[in-house]
Image: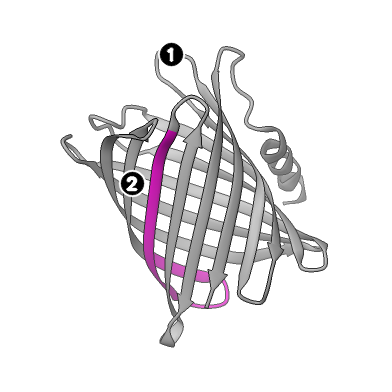
Amino acid sequence: MRTFLIPLALAAAFGAAGPASASEDTQYWQTLNISVALPDNFKVSNETVRRSSDARGFYEIENNFMVGKKLNKVVTVWLGYTFDPQYNHGTLRVREHRFRQQVNFDNFAVLGKVKLSGRLRMEERWREGQTGTAWRLRPQVKATVPIAGKVTLSVSNEEFIDLNNSNFQTVDGFERMRNAIYVTVPLSKKISIDFGYLNQHSFVPNGPDSSDNVLTAGLSASF
C-alpha cells in the first residue's frame, strides 16, 4: 500500500503522461458544495461546478444533487441526479442529464498520518436530441495528509470507464483520467476552501489525445 501512494502522488502532481502529440488546454474550475445532515444518518448534498477554458471559454455548469445514507463510519451510499448543460464560449450546445449511484469509502485505511478514501460511481447519461443511454463507471482513490494544523494536502486519481457505446459515448473502456493535487483550508467548523491543480487526460480514438491543465478552487459548507 505504501508503494501505491508514491505513483499516485507523482501522477497527481505532474499530470498523466500522454503522447507528445496530445492537444492541450488550460482550464479553470470553480466548485460550490453544500451538504446538510438529516436524521437517521441521511444527508443531502448539492454541488455546482462552473468550467471555462482558454480554448472554449465558458463551456459547462454542472449541478449535482444527491441523497446519501451513512451505513457505518466508513461506508456511505448515494443516489442523485445531474443536470449538465454544455456550451461553447457561452453558447448552449447540448443539455445532458445523468442518474448517479455512488458508494463512498471514507478513511478506509490509515498509514501513519495519511488517510485513504475511495469512491465508486456509476452514471447513466442522456442528451437531449440524441438517442441512447451511455453507461460509465468512475472509480476514485484519494490520499490526504495534514500539513499545518487542520490544513490538509490531498492527491487523487479518478478514472472514467465507458461500459457501452452511444451516439455521444464512442470510446470503448478506459476513456479518461483525472489526477489532482489540492490544499484544503478550514475557515470554520462548517466552511472550508480548497485550491489546487488537476490534469485531465482523455484518450481519443483515431486522433491525438487531449490533456487539460486545470486550476481548481472550491468552497464547501456542511451543516
Q: Earlier in the sequence, mark 2 or mark 1?
A: 2
| Mark 2 crowdedness (10 Å alpha carbons): few <14, some 14-19, many ≥20 | many
- Where in the figure is residue 19, as x and y percent of width and height? 59, 16
Taking depth in this image into account, of 206 and 35 the one nearest to the observer is: 35
Please report the residue visible at 41 percent of the width from the left and 59 percent of the height from the top: 102
Please report the residue visible at 69 percent of the width from the left and 69 percent of the height from the top: 187
- Where in the figure is residue 50, as x and y percent of width and height? 46, 46
> Which of the numbered marks, if any, corresponds to residue 207?
1
Please report the residue visible at 34 percent of the width from the left and 61 percent of the height from the top: 80
- Where in the figure is residue 120, as x and y percent of width and height? 47, 54
**Pointers 2 and 1 in contact (CB under 8 A)?**
no
Q: Which residues are magenta?
A: 58-78
Question: Amino acid type of disc 1?
Answer: Gly
> Which of the numbered marks, if any, corresponds to residue 178?
none
> Which residue in the structure is indicated by mark 2?
84
Tell me, yes or no, whether the highlighted magenta stretch contains residue 63.
yes
* CA distance separating discs 2 and 1: 26 Å
